[in-house]
Amino acid sequence: MKKLFIALIVLVAFVSFPSHATAWERSFHWSWEPWGLGAGTFFLIPIFLMIAFWVAVIIGFVYFVRWIIAAGKRHETKSEETALDILKKRYAKGEISKEEFDRIKQDIT
């Protein structure tokens, strides 16, 4: 993400450099050029905005999908009790005897 942001800044700086080199000449004159980028780069502004918009949409979509997947994994980690756990609880409650516990445990494992 940081690399993409830095690349966009470098690209904008590179494209607008020629107009900044002569900015001192135009500093006191009115100009129709937006943000002082120069007439040659005027058509690039909508392209940069469109690219930035779609990059933001794609990054948002990726984070949304990752969030959905993570939410699904959180629910999957809640495992059900195994048969041995249930058997141990029944033995602890006194529902079955030691002999029954050992016999059922051998059958399970």
Image (cartoon, grey):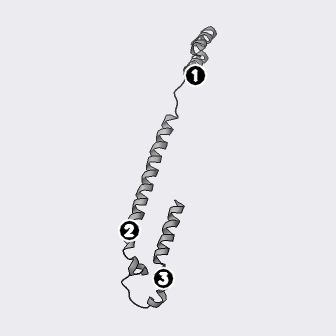
Amino acid on which disc 2 is placed: Ile
Amino acid on which disc 3 is placed: His
Residue 100 location in percent, x, y?
59, 9
Q: Residue at x 43, y 59 (%)?
A: 56
Mark 3 vs mark 2, CA separation in Å: 20 Å
Task: Between residue 102 and residue 28, name the one nearer to us.
Answer: 28
Crowding around mark 2 (Cα neighbors within 10 Å: few <14, some 14 to 19, many 20+) is few
Q: In this view, does 23 lie above or below 76?
A: below
- Which mark is drawn over residue 20? 3
Amino acid on which disc 1 is placed: Asp
Crowding around mark 1 (Cα neighbors within 10 Å: few <14, some 14 to 19, many 20+) is few
Residue 76 location in percent, x, y?
49, 35
- In primary-sequence order, the first of circles 3 and 2 is 3
Task: Between residue 85 and residue 26, name the one nearer to us.
Answer: 26
Q: Residue at x 58, y 19 (%)?
A: 84
- Which mark is drawn over residue 85? 1
Q: How many marks?
A: 3
Question: Mark 2 sits on what residue?
Answer: 47
Q: In this view, does 59 lie above or below 5?
A: above
Q: Is residue 14 left or right of residue 106?
A: left
Q: Residue at x 43, y 79 (%)?
A: 37
- In primary-sequence order, the first of circles 1 and 3 is 3
Q: Assign a secondary structure to mark 1.
A: helix
